[in-house]
Amino acid sequence: MKLTKMLGMASLAVTMGVSYSVLAADTATIDEVKAKVTEAAKYLADKKDAGLAEFDGKDKAWAWKDTYVFVYDCKADKAIAHPKLKDKPIMDLKDKAGNPIFGGDNGLCKAGEQAGGGWVVYMWPKQGSEDPVPKATFAMKVEGTDYQVAAGIYADKKVENFQLKD
């Protein structure tokens, strides 16, 4: 009887471990976000406007795991490629806490202008939810254009030891 119970608990532990591994595999990491944004900036610097279509849609190369690279133009005050914000003004957009997301001294536009890009943390709901959670987004300027590219990761309980370090 004890052996059966122990085998059952061992099986449960393995199943839980596999489930966590699958969940973790479906969650983008900070390093992946930064690498993908850097790659996207280089891609658009080369392709310019001809490359924009590659960023529009969940089935495109710039969408992976639970995130995606989006494109925006701070000077034109609009999102160029984004699932919810495409062609909408961005500079006055604020999170639920009243913090500017794109504009202001701590927004994505300023972060993207930094040499090598920069991070911004704001409150944003996950897809299918109304409740905002902390989201950290890495932004970078696309050389030779007015565009910037960015992607984010949710900093909720799925992400352990969340820290932004370069």
Image (cartoon, grey):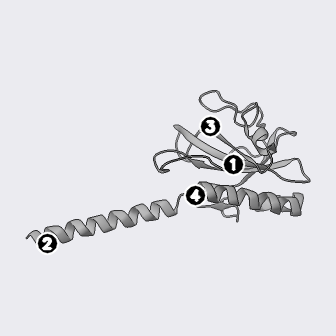
Q: Are marks 3 and 2 in contact (CB under 8 Å)?
A: no
Circle on res. 4: 2
How far from the left and from the top, in percent, is residue 39?
75, 62
Q: Most extreme residue toward the front, as rendered?
A: 166
Residue at image coords 63%, 33%: 95
Q: Earlier in the sequence, mark 3 or mark 2?
A: 2
Circle on res. 28: 4
Q: Quadrant of residue 9?
A: bottom left
Q: Are marks 4 and 2 in contact (CB under 8 Å)?
A: no
Kind of residue at disc 3: Tyr
Count of numbered labels shown in the rendering? 4
Residue at image coords 59%, 28%: 97
Q: Quadrant of residue 7?
A: bottom left
Circle on res. 138: 1
Q: CA distance from mark 1 to mark 4?
A: 13 Å
- The answer to whether residue 10 is left or right of residue 109 is left
- The answer to whether residue 83 is left or right of residue 115 is left
Q: CA distance from mark 4 to mark 2?
A: 38 Å
Q: Earlier in the sequence, mark 4 or mark 3?
A: 4
Q: CA distance from mark 2 to mark 1?
A: 50 Å
Label 3 residue SS? strand
